[in-house]
Image: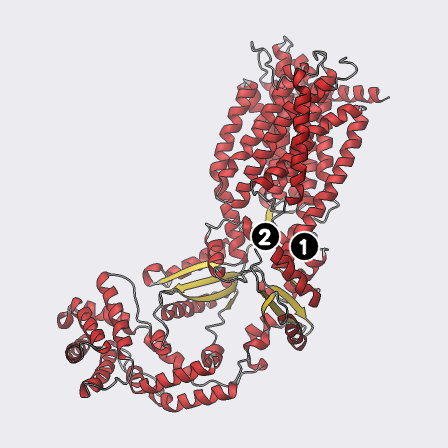
Amino acid sequence: MSETISELGRRVVVGWVDLMRRFAVAASIIAVCATIWTGYFVVQNVSINTDTEDMLSADLPFRVNSRALSEAFPQFSDNILVVIDGQTPDVADDAAMALGEAMRAMPGQFGDVYDLAGHPFFRQNGLLYLDVDELYELSDRLAEAQPFLGTLWRDPSLRGLLDMLGLAIDELLKDEGGEAPIEIDRVLNAMSATLEAQKEGRFDRLSWQRLMMEAEDDEGPYRRFILIQPALDFGSLQPAEDAIDALRALAMDIHLTTENGVRVRLTGSAAMAQEELKSVEQGMGLAALLSFVLVVALLLTGFRSIKLAAATLATLVMGLVWTAGFAVAAVGQLNLISVAFAVLFIGLSVDFGIHFGLRYKEAVDHGGDHANALGEAARSVGGALTLCAVAAAIGFFSFLPTAYRGLAELGLIAGAGMFIALFSNLSVLPALISLAPIRPGTSKPRRVGISIGANARVVLWGALALGVAAALLLPKARFDFDPLNLKDRNTESVATYFDLIEGQHTGPYSVTVLAENLLLAGELAKKVNVLDEVDETATLADYVPSDQDEKLDIIGTMALFIAPALANENTTAAPPADQNRAALIAALDRLKRLAKMRPDRTAGGAAARLETALEALGGARADEAAIGEMQDRLVSSLPARLAHLRSSLDAEPVNLDSLPEGLRTREIAADGRARLEIYPREDLTDREALKRFVAAVRKVAPDATGGPIVILEAGDAVVEAFRDAALIALGGITILLALVLRNVRDTLFVFSPLLLATLLTVACSVLFNLPFNFANVIVLPLLFGLGVANGIHVVSRARDDAADDGSGGGVFATSTPRAVVFSALTTVGSFGSIALSSHPGTASMGILLTIAISLTLVCTLVLLPALMARWPSSREQ
């Protein structure tokens, strides 16, 4: 009965291929039209979700907790973090305030604009967040500078600044051994550095914030952050592109450039996703061109026929488009795993095409006409192709019941793609070949593979040793779920992100707990803080300053002596150039006298330096442009700093209710639940430290979520998914092969090279430190599909071909092993070149794929002949 079914299947395939031959033109036109329509459908509807968490089942407990956090605080989703670096704190602050104001004027484009440091609440109450000792020191410095601040407030110009210096220098000149009422050497040196930069043509602005706060003159950069939640176009493959382009254009419009001492960079989830797709696309550019050239060259070499190579490529493209159409229709939104269906389809579809094409060419070369050659190819490989397609589909479909959603969707698409590949290679390919049949060639079949003969035992024992050694490395194989390790660190968003966390032991690996209310969050924080694995915690309550009564008294005292100096609005008109010049001449005179009176003192040296800097710019003879630039460099940031100082003197008591609404909604959900952020003490890039931290926190807060928990749980879920899928696939394919081949020996022959290639591939991933990740994990199902296909092709040809010489080696003188070789080489040529990509995930896929397919090829051409020689079938004996 089984023979009857087998023969019936062959007759159906032969009849179908012959039908495609007789109606080749019509079939080709229908195929092209279907491809055009499907391609249009794909372009109009395809979308990609780059969120790696969404590649796992939403029903997993850690995903449920993560989703609950996202729903409670949607403000943290799809964000762009604008990182503003300024040469001085003044420049950074002014740039952030200007950019924030400009973005708020375009709410439809930039949505919510959150600038915590620039919020009026913190401008007014910022002094409360200083330590008491720091506040006393600031009060003392401002008390000394009070008369001079008043002068600058009334006249924030070059004239006002030089007049203020004149007052201070006059105090020193009155008493040779006296002290200046302000730290005049710091002011003089800061002015000198700014004017020296002017002479050299470098950007520099005098930082009044550093002078007032007595900050160290470090090199910066000084950094401000703005968090925005822009309008994203989810109908596009690059949803954040418009927002990012608009933001960059806006920054340019308001002159936030490196030439003006400002660098604006973008990071955050939306920016990273945008550049992730762009990086992959750019990385694939050269790889795609190189792959195309390699594939064409390999097909031409393998077929030795332009017509067959062109027909195979055209069939491949049509089938790929049809599979993409199925993917969009069946799944809708692709993810970073399921989008790799193209890799699997190309690898196996080109395998089908090469086997069919080479078998057809072999028949033609042996004197058959076109019709008979197509019929022979269909009869000879049609059953094997069908068996390969069903076996590969079982392997891919085995991921459907697992919690690994990304791979489950890939399995659905790739499994369906196997039947599409089978259909296209038994329909489109014969039709296209029939449009331009090939002529008989003069080349004779070359033996492909290794003559094993008496060395079969040595090969088998060597294979066994390699397999055992590789199996010992299996426990060391790992899956790297950390999405940061897949990103291209050369892109701005990723480079900026790592720049932000550099030197911070906590990095991005904090854990978040949703407590029922803020009180319970505080109680939980006390329990967590005693853990050795925890560094610190944060809740909304931490934004309420401590020691407020004492700090408000200090600020009140400061207001008594500073507020009068800053009481009235500045209405003084900018002085004309001649008045600035007069002030400059007077200042030069004072500086010369101070330098002469105190040459060995700090103030005297600073005065001499400033005098030199002024003279280098023309001194008393400086032109108006130079004097105007001096004013801009020295006092342009002063009014904003004085205004900020005046505002901070109006500080008021802070409590939870008075905190800004934007901050409250980021810490307290609409239903009253409160966020508790927990930071680790150890570096969690160490997996053991990660496990310790997660275990410790979960003992106190079982429902905690965040990066460390996602990384740990997702890795376990992926390992479990592969284990379950492997058992399902192994069982399903074994049953299939047993039913079709009806021979335990042949079934083991199909699986043996695959098993060894899989073990060796995993061992290589350990030895070469190539952990499996979201990008390269598709190598395993591809290896499985191609490995099974190779074994089926060789074993089926050995069973059916009378040319077998009784040692299991005759099959290696036919077109079948040649097809195996060129199928593998074409797959490597298609995707091995992506190892050159700058994108780590893409590159790792190319490297591991090259290793896996190469090992599969070697195992098929070395181990399988040895097995067939050592244990020939009864017919071969």
Q: Residue at 53% of width from left, 80% of height from top?
A: 545
Q: Residue at 60% of width from left, 53% of height from top?
A: 51
Q: Can see residue 476? A: yes
Coloring applied to the structure: secondary structure
Location of residue 533 by image quarter: bottom right
> Taking 328 as reference, is 127 above or below it?
below
Quadrant of the image containing the C terminus? top right
Q: Position of residue 788 (x, y in %)?
A: 69, 30
Q: Residue furthest left?
A: 621
Quadrant of the image containing the N terminus? top right
Q: Amino acid at mark 1?
A: Glu
Q: Residue at 66% of width from left, 14% of height from top?
A: 373
> Taking 207 as reference, is 429 above or below it?
above
Q: Residue at 65% of width from left, 53% of height from top?
A: 54
Residue count near mark 2 (Cα–Cα under 10 Å), binned few <14, some 14–19, many ≥20: some
> Taking 450 as reference, is 227 above or below it?
below
Q: Position of residue 790 (x, y in %)?
A: 67, 26
> Taking 494 as reference, is 789 above or below it?
above
In this view, the residue in front, 21 or 578, is 578
What SS does tag 2 mark? loop
Residue count near mark 1 (Cα–Cα under 10 Å), binned few <14, some 14–19, many ≥20: some
Residue 713 is marked as 1
Kindly report the distance in space between the C-alpha atoms of the residues bearing marks 2 and 1: 11 Å
What SS does tag 1 mark? helix
Query: Is 385 placed left or right of 346 in the picture?
Result: right
Query: Is 129 placed left or right of 317 in the picture?
Result: left
In this view, the residue in front, 182 or 408, is 182
Q: Position of residue 310 (x, y in %)?
A: 55, 24
Residue 659 is marked as none
Residue 482 is marked as 2
Q: Amino acid at mark 2?
A: Asp
